[in-house]
Image: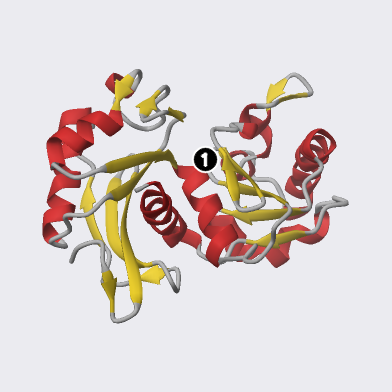
Amino acid sequence: MTKKRHHGHHHGLGIDIGGSGIKGAPVDLDKGKFADERLRIPTPQPSTPEAVAGVVAQILDHFEWDGPFGCTFPAVVQHGVTQTAANVDPSWIGCDAQGLLRAKTGRKALVVNDADAAGIAEVEFGAAKGHRGAVLVSTLGTGIGSALVLGGHLFPNTELGHLEIDGYDAEKRAADSAREREDLSWEEWGGRLTRYYQHVENLLWPDLIVVGGGVSKKFSRWQPYVQTRTPMVPAQLLNDAGIIGAALLAHQEH
């Protein structure tokens, strides 16, 4: 499959690089859905740039994909360079990830922060579809990921989970991992989320907050305990969001 109109639909391909698995799929960019079954390959250990690039090439070959593709990565990504490395080998820091993937695969690559990719997917196809205002997409998991989208355009690498609130890195107290680690009730955790989201909305004044991450499936259990003036809704695309967003951004870029 190549980047082409296919029975009236246009396609992209997205790959989601994580600490434990690397997942990829072709995406129907008219519908915002996978166009084929997702392939998952365990992340090589150690997860060096060379080793990971080899798996990315494997996924592209599996789908016989020779067009541009998008890759999410758990890091700040500036102009294709990975500036940080969360849950992957530290040798990614300062790596020209985009250049490496292009050289290793022979295809045009776009590398994007994983929360940013999920955010753009939720705005284009998910919970914030059709919303042209300021949307904050926030993922609650081991940490707190964030994506800020204004009028359908991404403001990249916001890293709002690392705001300092009450002397703490915000995600240390408010991420889903903190809830589990400290065995917090939904109400107790809701109080911490209230502190976090009120701080963020006083800085950015978003029009909508979309909450993703695994715990968004239990949205109705904890959301009543979160007090914000901004409307808050659960993400819809869940684990597919990164792949869909990466495919979309790469398609737009090229």
Q: Nearer the viewer, residue 126 or 19?
A: 126
Measured as percent of width and height from the top left, residue 148 is found at 63, 43
- Which residue is pictured at 36% across the width and 30% down the height? 80
The correct choice, above or below, for 127 with respect to 58 in the image is below
Horizontally, is 233 left or right of 18 in the view? right
Q: Mark 1 highlights which residue?
A: 142
- Which residue is pictured at 32% across the width and 60% down the height? 12
Task: Give the total number of marks visible in the rendering.
Answer: 1
| Residue 139 visible in the current orientation | no
Measured as percent of width and height from the top left, residue 68 is found at 26, 50
- Which residue is pictured at 64% across the width and 33% down the height? 160
Please rate how many residues cluster around mark 1, counting C-alpha atoms within 10 Å: few if below 14, some from 14 to 19, many from 20: some
| Residue 248 visible in the current orientation | yes
Q: Nearer the viewer, residue 121 or 153?
A: 153
The correct choice, above or below, for 159 with respect to 33 in the image is above
- Picture quadrant of residue 32: bottom left
- Which residue is pictured at 16% across the width and 30% down the height? 50
Horizontally, is 11 left or right of 180 in the view? left
Query: How was the colour assigned to the protein in this rendering?
Result: secondary structure
Query: Which amino acid type is shown beneath numbered disc 1?
Result: Thr
Q: Nearer the viewer, residue 148 or 2?
A: 2
- Picture quadrant of residue 165: top right
Horizontally, is 90 left or right of 120 in the view? left
Measured as percent of width and height from the top left, residue 172 is found at 62, 30
- Picture quadrant of residue 156: top right
